[in-house]
Amino acid sequence: MSYTFPRSAELYARAQKSIAGGINSGIRKLEVPVPLYFDHGQGCRLWDVDGNEYIDFQTGQGALLYGHAPAGMAEALSVQARKGTHWAAQSELEIDVAERLQRLIPGAERVRFNNSATEVVLAAFRLARAHTGRQLILKFEGHYHGWADEGLVGFAPPPDQWGTEEEPTRLHPSQGVISEVLEQFVVARWNDVEHLRQRVDQYRGQIAAIVFEPVLCNTGCMEPVPGLLSTIRELCDRDGMLMIADETITGFRFGPGGAQTHYGVVPDLTILGKAIGGGVPFAALVGKEASFAKFLSGAAVHAGTLNANPLCLAAAKWCLDQILELGSDHPKTLISLGQKTMQGLRALADEYGIPLRPQGPGLVFHATMLKPGAAEGPVTSYRDYVLRHDAPRWAHLRRCLLEEGVRAIERGLWFLSLAHTEADVDEALVRARRAFARHAE
Ligand code: PLP
């Protein structure tokens, strides 16, 4: 008997009378048949208000690297909550967290804190512009850098507005943004080294920074082709641009030093979110001291009432202590569990004749559902992904998975956590078999 969601449906109906649209983040509206209301989580499991239990591969959009409600973090939060949640001032905790980041991330000579990665992206762009006296930021098609005006340029252009291969469009997916924001960006195609060189040369001397997700997790989960990240480094050094790695998803997931250590590059600035707070609102900008100069002098403004509040710092300190304790070994566990999940899903897909193609490094992966007649092989670029991924069919399979107690992200991403075990993955695959059978009916 698959899950039903009467209580969630009831709450959603009630929510729409007070909360605009009934949800607090646009993507949550995509949850079918109804946005779910949750009651509690533990480890890799989550329970909704109808009493349905899920093996969770959404894990707080990747923030819950340590699973739901880890006991140590709950303790750290409750100790701190009794001492105070917010002082709008300094605390020793903030130095503790900063020093841990310095130990973990090569090139983290200085740090600053905010409450979301969206804010940190804005801080990084402001620093880069102040540092170089230039306006343009080069970013890549399909890369997501938060929901602010500047983070979404070129994120998800539809095929009829792609622009040419040479000049990808600077489209914005949202109304209501400052129209000039588009003029502040150059968009390039991901994983095309020659094209990147041409774009930089075309705007040489005007670009303040190149920003990128080291693994394009937000679209199809594509690792960088060999030579791409080192080319970004080389071009930044050549032209005095800042290299900004957005490690909101990859930071700590890929090991203590994040994806930059894995791929062997040292950016000027790194954006950290999600796993750094393990599920509390916490994010950091880390990087070379010289890149922070305009914040040090006060020439560029950085602020925020709740920045570095002790409650979130207590959680972040606990999270970073886990990473320090685990050392460089934890990605191996995540990779092997992720690959086991990917292989299991692919085997089920083949058995039921469903064109689902998991792709990615394992510790995070994307399940691409091929459109009828689409070519086989990994998706390699944003455009390739849009042309080959059958989003409505994936949405149906995802719903079947949800109704059998396996939860993945609406857009097809799956996140492993350190709380998942082999047994959890085995059980998830048993549940997934029922979902695949229903989907194929
Ligand atoms: N950058 C990347 C790569 C992300 O994936 C996200 C969120 O998913 C953000 C930035 C924005 O993070 P937040 O939602 O914490 O503002």
Image (cartoon, helix red, strand yellow):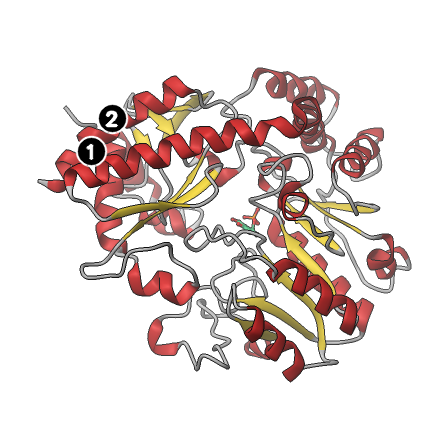
Q: Which residue is mark 1?
A: 435
Q: In the image as oriented, which residue stretches furthest toward the right? A: 297
The foreground one among 73 and 392 is: 392
The foreground one among 378 and 146 is: 378
Please, what is the three-letter code of the amino acid marked with disc 2?
Arg
In the rendered image, residue 113, in percent from the top left (x then y), is placed at 73, 44
Q: Which residue is mark 2?
A: 431
Quadrant in which the C terminus is drawn: top left
Decide: is 132 above or below 439.
below
Residue 318 location, quadrant: top right
Q: Secondary structure at mark 1?
A: helix
Residue 38 seen by the camera: yes
In the rendered image, residue 293, in percent from the top left (x then y), is placed at 87, 59
Task: Tell whether 435 sits left or right of 18.
Answer: left
The foreground one among 408 and 205 is: 205
Residue at the image position 49 percent from the left and 24 percent from the top: 68
Residue at the image position 78 percent from the left and 32 percent from the top: 100
Task: Tell whether 349 sits left or right of 269.
Answer: left
- Assess whether mark 1 and mark 2 are in contact (beta carbons under 8 angstroms): yes
Residue 178 seen by the camera: no
How far apart marks 2 and 1 lie (CA) works out to 7 Å
Please, what is the three-letter code of the amino acid marked with disc 1?
Ala
